[in-house]
Amino acid sequence: MGCGDWNVLDWPHWLRWGICRPLLLAGNAEVWPAALGIGLDATSGAEAELKTDGFYRWVRNPQYVADMGILVGWAILSASPAVWIIAMGGVVGFALTPFAE
């Protein structure tokens, strides 16, 4: 998504890459160790022991925070209104998910 109307908002290249690169890199650097650290079963919703080390020391759902950063990074990079709508829906979804768990 975002390739069909790539940079339709006409944001400068330096701005898009300057903001999105750290968000995408940091998001991926956080999401994979956090998910692997808690285990695949617990990441999928199975009961598990409360994790309080690593990324879990600062936030209860580091995967969701990381995924939000990745979504916003992609939206900034694509500079596409359609991607912004989808990304904001994803951010809201990730923000509300812990309340359903």
Image (tube, rainbow, N blue to C red):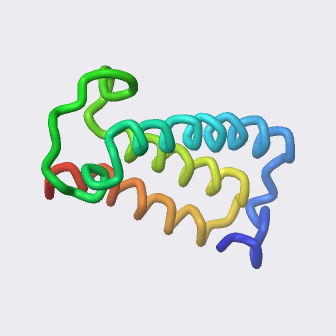
User: How far from the left and from the top, in percent, is residue 58?
Assistant: 32, 22
Residue 64: percent from left, percent from top: 38, 47
Residue at the right extreme of this rendering: 13
- Whether residue 4 is situated above or below residue 42 in the rendered picture: below
Vertical placement of residue 35 versus 97, above or below: above
Residue shown at 27% from the left, 55% from the top: 41
Q: Position of residue 60 (x, y in %)?
A: 26, 34
Taking the spot 79% from the left edge, 42% from the top edge, the residue there is 17
Across and down, in percent, residue 56 comes to 31, 28
Q: Is residue 28 above or below residue 41?
A: above
Residue drawn at the location 25% of the way across and 50% of the way down = 42
| Residue at 67% from the left image edge and 34% from the top image edge | 22
Q: Quadrant of the N terminus?
A: bottom right
**Of residues 36 and 19, which is closer to you in this image?**
36
Residue nearer the viewer, 47 or 69: 47
Q: Is residue 85 left or right of residue 91?
A: right
Tell me where residue 4 sits by quadrant: bottom right
